[in-house]
Image (cartoon, rainbow, N blue to C red):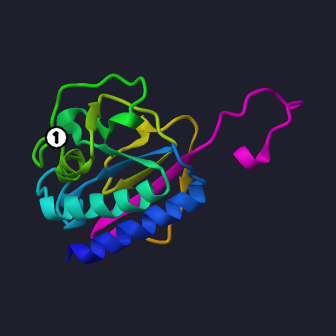
Amino acid sequence: MSENFSESARAIALELLEKAGLRAGHVVVVGCSTSEIIGHHIGTSSNTEIGVAIFEALNEVFSKSGVYLAAQCCEHLNRAIVVEREAAGNWEAVNAIPTPNAGGAFASAAFNGFRDPVVLEEIRTDAGLDIGGTLIGMHLKKVAVPLRLSVTHIGEAPVMAARVRPKSIGGERTKYDDSLR
């Protein structure tokens, strides 16, 4: 069962890398409800096996490209972020260890799977994946641009993706770099 979920996760990660133009050093926030993947209401049926499978698949793809994965916790930890310490930059760490029932199975898998994990209260990332309606927008840089991916669901959970672009400022006389839009 989790093998199909892993393949779908790999596919969306590879497509996001391409469509968002991600490069080494960029950070991708991922919110993932394992409850929604198996057809239950978010926060009601955390599944550790699926959380590990999704984490490992995404982390494998992103780390090969030098892109950092930031795993969003559930609302029990105020949607805190689990990330490798080297990706944390100047963001302030908090004292929390995600578990499947307080943080979620995916964030717990990230905390246990990263080499040197740290939990942050917030971060601003270059792109994001929302698996199951986890509301990742608070962790994206401005301005978020929705992306359509070919894989629209993992299990029963809808998949949404976004990249960011710099703000376009100025007026009608301003020239813009179209490659940044």
State which region is magenta: 152-181
Dividing the picture into quadrants, the one containing residue 56 is: bottom left
Q: Position of residue 76 (x, y in %)?
A: 17, 36
Residue that numbered label 1 is attached to: 98
Q: Residue at x 43, y 56 (%)?
A: 62
Q: Label 1 crowding class (10 Å Cα cut-off): few <14, some 14-19, many 20+? A: many
Instruction: Using the image, determine if residue 135 lies above or below residue 33.
Output: above
Observer able to see residue 28 = yes
Dividing the picture into quadrants, the one containing residue 72 is: top left
| Three-letter code for the amino acid on which mark 1 is drawn | Pro
Instruction: Using the image, determine if residue 30 lies above or below residue 167.
Output: below
Observer able to see residue 181 = no
The answer to whether residue 176 is magenta is yes
Q: Residue at x 12, y 41 (%)?
A: 102
Which secondary structure, mark 1? loop
Viewer-proximal residue, 69 or 4?
Answer: 69
Instruction: Using the image, determine if residue 112 lies above or below residue 18.
Output: above
Q: Position of residue 173 (x, y in %)?
A: 89, 30
Dividing the picture into quadrants, the one containing residue 119 is: top left
Q: Residue at x 24, y 55 (%)?
A: 33
- 52 sits left or right of 20 in the view: left
Viewer-proximal residue, 153 or 99?
Answer: 99
Q: Position of residue 123 (x, y in %)?
A: 40, 32
Viewer-proximal residue, 172 or 124?
Answer: 124
Q: Position of residue 176 (x, y in %)?
A: 81, 38
